[in-house]
Image: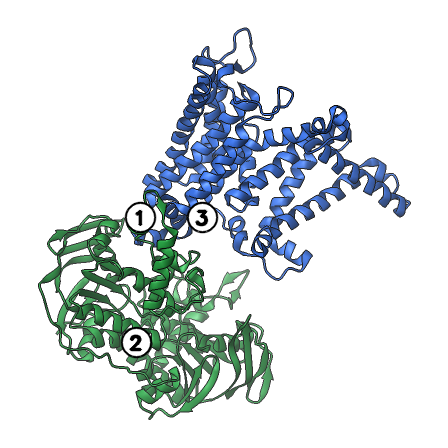
Chain colours: A blue, B green
Amino acid sequence: MRKVLQKIKLPILALVVALFVSGLLIAFSDPKVLALKGDPLAMLGKALSIAGSAYWALFRGSIYDPQLADTGFFGGLYPLSETIVVSTPLILTGLSVALAFKAGLFNIGAQGQFIVGAIGASYVGFTFELPIVLHALAAIAAAIICAGLYGGFVGLLKARTGAHEVIVTIMLNYVASYFLLWLLSTKAFLREGRMDPIAPEVLESSRLPRLAGQDYRLHAGIFIALLAATAIWWLLNRSTLGFKFRAVGANAKASRTAGISVAKSTTFVMVIAGALAGLGGAVHILGADHALTNEVGGSFGFDAITVALLGRGTPLGTVLAALLFGALRAGGLTMQASTETPLDIVLIIQALVVLFIAAPAVIKAIFRLKSVDEGQAMASKGWNG
Amino acid sequence: MSLELRGITKRFGALTANDSIDLKVESGEIHAILGENGAGKSTLMNIVYGLLAPDEGTISVDNKVLDIQSPLDALAAGIGMVHQHFMLIPVFTVAENIVLGHEQVKGPGFLDLESARREILRVSAEFNFDVDPDALVEDLPVGIQQRVEIIRALIYDAKVLILDEPTAVLTPQETDELLRNMKKLRDQGTAIVFITHKLREVREAADKITIIRRGKVVGTASPSASQAELATLMVGRPVSLDVDKSAPKLGKVALDVRNLTVRDYTGRALVKGITFSIQDGEILAVAGVQGNGQSELAEAIVGLQEHIEGEITLDGKNLAGASVRTALHSGIAFIPESREEDGLISSFSIEENLILDLHDLLPFSKGAAISQSAVAENGVTRVAEFDIRALSPKDPASSLSGGNKQKVVLARELSRPVRLVVASQPTRGLDVGSIEFVHERIIAERDSGRAVLLFSTELDEVVGLADRIAVMYRGEFIAIVPADTSREELGLLMAGVKK
C-alpha cells in the first residue's frame, strides 16, 4: 500500500497544483474579480466563488449532476457515462503510447493509427451485412489489422533503416488525416445525399451494445478497453515477448548482447501499439459516433501521449489517467456552458499536469518531498529515449 | 610549496566517501595515494581541485587556508590536475585545447594562439615532451594526449600536480616514460600527487605512500614495502596476488578462426585477417593497448559485428555470420567489456538479469509466458552459488557494486552449457577481492576442459592467466607467444615493435 502511495504521489500532487494554478487563472481572468481590485477582501471572496463555481460545473459535467437527477439517482449519472465514453478510446490510445514507451519507442503516431483503425472499422461496419456480434468482431479485426500494419510499418522502417520513429509517426499522422479527408470525398465513403465529409452510419449489427439504455451513450467499448489494459499488463509483466520489449526499452545494447533481436522487438511492438490505437478508433466508431467524419480523431492520439505520461507508462496508470482526462473533457463542456469559463482552461489544466510531472523538482520544492522515484525518467528521458 | 588537507569529509547520502582525511604533500616529492576502486581517492582529489565541495575540513597551501570553489580557484592556487579521462576536445588542436578557458585576445577580439604556442614549445622542450602545438588532439596517441594535459597544468604554473590513475590507459613503455617525467618534474620542485591502485608503479616512483581504504587513511608506507604488504594494507586482509593454476590439460581444438577481418560501416578494417585456434582446457589471452581491435574481435566471435569476412568455427560448426543467439546457444559464454552497458540492464532485477539470454527457453518460459517461480528459484540459486552480495534477487541490478554486477554476468553466462568463454576485460574497475573471484572462475572453467579467450589490457592479468599470449596491435595478432614471455618483450610487442 505504501509503495502504491509512493508511486501515485507525484501525479496526484501535480494534479492538485495544476488545479490550483488553473483556479487562479479562472478567477483572475474574470472581469468581475478584476473590477474589485480596490477591495482585496471582497476580491478574494469573489475569486473563490468564481473558481469554485467553475470547478463545481466541471464536476457536474463529468461525474454527477444533481440537476439531472429528477428521474432518480441514475439520471444524475449521465455525465459519468459521457466521461467513460470519452475515456474509452483514450485508454486504448494511451496504452499504445505506454507500450511503445516501455520498449524504448516514442509513438507519436497514435493519432494516425486511430484514424486508420476508425476507417477500417467504419468501412466494414457500413459495407457488409453480417450477423450481430460477428459483424462487430469483423469490424474490430479490420481496424486492428489496418492500424497494426500502419504502426508496424514505422517499426520496420526503424529496424531496417534506423529512421527515427518520432519523425516517421508525425508524418504518418498527416498522411492518415489527409487520406481520411480524401476518402470521405470518394464514392465508396460519401454518404448518399450529403456534400460534407461524413460516411454512412455503421449498420446496427456492427454496433457495440449500449450498457445503460438508449439515453446513455455508455457502450461495451469500456470493457474492451479494460480487457486490453489487462492483456497489456500480462504481456509486459508475464510474457516472454514482453520481457524482450522491456529489455530492449531499458538497454538495447545489453539486449543485443544477450541475443535479443532489437529489430524484431521494434517491429512487433509497433504492430501491437498500432493495433491498440486502431482498436481505439474502432471502439469509438462502433460504440459512440457510428459515422466516420473528418473529425473522428479529435485529439485522442495526441492526448494519449499525455495520458501515458501521467499514467507513468503502466497499464493501470494509463486507465486512471484516461478516466481523468475523459472527465476533464466531458466536464469542460458543461463548465463552458454554465459559467463563463472557456473550455480552454481544461487544456491548460492538462498541460500544467504534464508540466509539473515533467519537472518534478517543482513539486518536490512545493511539498518539500525528499525524493521522487524514478518514474519521472519517462518525462525527462527525451527523444533518444 | 606544500599542500595540506585537514579533516576532509565528504558524504553522498548515507555513504561517507571521505572520512576526515589528513594529508600533507611537500614540494619535490611524489606522494602516492594508494587505494582500491571506490576507496575515495578520486573524490578526495576532486575536492582539492574544486570540482566537489567538502562537507568538512580545510585545504591549505603553504599554511594558508584556501577557499577553493572551482578548478579556476585551484589553478590560481597552483594546483593542477590530470584526470583519468582526459578533458580534451578531440577536434581542437593542442594549442586550442590549452588556451581553453583562458583565451587571450589581441586587437579587436582575435584569439591569440601565438603566445600559447610559444609556451607549449618551451615547456615541451624543457621536458623532452615532443608535443606539436598544431596537431589535432584526436590524431595523437593516448600517451601524448596525457602530456598535453600535463603541459596545460605546467603552463598555468601548477606547483602541485595531481595525476588521477595516469597509467590506466598507457602501454608499459609509455608508463615508464611517464614515471621518468614525473621524477624529472619532482626534481624541479613540483609536488606530485599520484593516484593509483597499481602496486608496481607505486614502488617504482613514489617517495611517500598514503593508503586509503573505504574513505579513511589507513596508514602510510615507504616505497621499500613489498607488494604483498601494500596489497594487504589496501584491501584490509592478506590477498594472493598470484593466480594459482596447474599445467593445462589440452584437448581438441574448440575455436578455430581463419583470416577473420572485421570492418566498420565505412569499410575500414578494424581486425585484419586474424588466424588462430584455441584448444579445450586452454586460455588464450589477447594482450594489447586498448583500441587495437580487441573489442571488435570479441564481438565478431559472438556475432555482434555485421561486416565480417573469414571463418569462425566452434567444434566444427560455422559461426561466421550467425546471429548472437545462435552463437550463445552454440556454447559461447560472453563477458562483455562494459558490464553496465552491454552486460546488464540496470533497471531490471537481479533475477531478471540472470535470465536475460535464457528467458525464452525452458524452464523459464512456458509457452508465451515466463514462469515466475522458475525465475525466482534460479535467482536464489545463482545468487548463492556466485556469492552475489544483494539483499534480495528482486533488487535492481543498479543497487549492486561493480564486483557483484560482474558476478551476475558470470553467473548468467556460465549457467548455460558452455564450450568457449569469451571474456573482455573481465576485471576492469573491480576491487582486489572481486578480481580474485573472477580469476578463480576463469581458471575453473579452463580446468573443466573449456576453451577460454581472454582479452585484457592489464599485463599482470594476461601473464597470470594465460597459457598462450597473443599480442594485438592495429587489428593484427603481431605475435602469439608462450605464457612465460618476458614483460619487456610483451611491452615492445604491444607498442608494435617486432624483433
Q: Which residue is mark 1?
A: B360
- Res. A202 visible in picture: no
- Assess whether mark 2 and mark 3 are in contact (beta carbons under 8 angstroms): no
Which quadrant would the C terminus of chain B be assigned to in this image? bottom left
Q: Chain of mark 1?
A: B
- Residue B427 vs A153, above or below: the answer is below
The residue at the far right in this view is A39
Q: Dot 2 falls on which chain?
A: B
Q: Is residue A192 above or below residue A100?
A: above
Pinpoint the chain carrying mark 3: A
Answer yes or no: is residue B272 visible: yes
Name the kind of residue labelled 1 in the image. Answer: Asp
- Front one among A342 and A70: A70
Residue for badge 3: A384
* Secondary element type, mark 3: loop
Are labels 3 and 1 on one chain?
no
Residue B436 numbered mark, or none? 2
Q: Of helix, strand and loop, which one carries label 1?
A: loop
Q: Residues within 10 Å of mark 2 (few under 14, many from 20)?
A: some
